[in-house]
Amino acid sequence: MWSLYHKEITSFFSSLTGYLVVGVFLVLTGLFLWVIPGEMNILFGGYATLDSLFYLAPWLYLFLVPAVTMRLFAEEKRSGTIELLYTRPLTEFHIVLAKYLAGFTLVVISLLPTLIYFYSVVQLGNPVGNIDYGGTWGSFVGLLFLAGIYVAIGVFCSSLTDNQIVSFVIAVLLCFVFYYGFEALSQLVPGSNSQSLIVYLGIDEHYQSMSRGVIDSRDLLYFISVITLLLFLTRTVMGSRKW
């Protein structure tokens, strides 16, 4: 399992994929937060906060994460190398988990440099350090879990087809549904209880909850349950098709 994980990480950075994803994420967030005038620009906002980053990142990852995960199984099936994986002493779930962890690792790598933004905002505060540490760190944790679901969706979609483009499109649509679709759907359903239930099924409700600086066990349970369910579905799909 470690060898497969290492192989995937190496393949990310032996091609343009890894560098492109990390570079695009950092360039776009850097431009919106520090260069382009507007509401998301920290210097123009006048407040020591990273709220703009945590608003922008889920939308960027909505496209970048599927771009990372679209090849994980699709390419293996297209080239026929998926058959070699089944000859290794690995269970199907171990294969799925190794590929999931590889995709998630790349997301973590792309997020680590944003700690420079955090340090900058701390130094720019008046007085220095005048920032909501609880809300900021809670948002970072929430963003990691959000990206974790995106990666799980991407891995699942990659297992459905041998076409990377099809995998990418389906993953983007599902990520959008999980992040914003449930909230939009709740507006069409009458009754406050029904609306609350539908909103609760979406990622944004739990992401916003963590952004307040409170790590609620219900939010953790939601993220872990959705990721586990998607990985189980991926394992089921792969188990039903012996490539």
Image: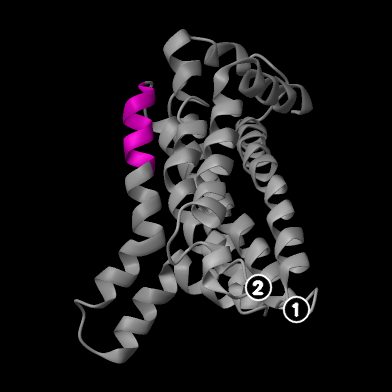
Disc 2 to disc 1, C-alpha distance: 7 Å
Quadrant in the rendering for residue 164: top left
Q: Which residue occupies the extreme bottom position in the image?
A: 192
Q: How many marks?
A: 2
In the rendered structure, which amino acid carries the disc numbered 2? Answer: Ala
Res. 130 mark: 1
How many residues crowd mark 2 within 10 Å: few (<14), some (14–19), many (20+)?
many
Q: Position of residue 72 (x, y in %)?
A: 53, 26
Indicate the secondary structure of the residue bearing disc 2: loop
Q: Is residue 142 left or right of residue 122?
A: left
Q: Position of residue 162 (x, y in %)?
A: 38, 21
Q: Main secondary structure of the magenta part?
A: helix
Q: Provide the residue designation for mark 2.
A: 48
Q: Is residue 232 visible?
A: no
Res. 239 mark: none
Q: Which residues are magenta?
A: 163-171
**Residue positioned 38% across, 79% down in the render:** 197
Q: Earlier in the sequence, mark 2 or mark 1?
A: 2
Is 168 magenta? The answer is yes
Is 117 magenta? The answer is no
**Residue positioned 57% across, 64% down in the render:** 42
Indicate the secondary structure of the residue bearing disc 1: loop
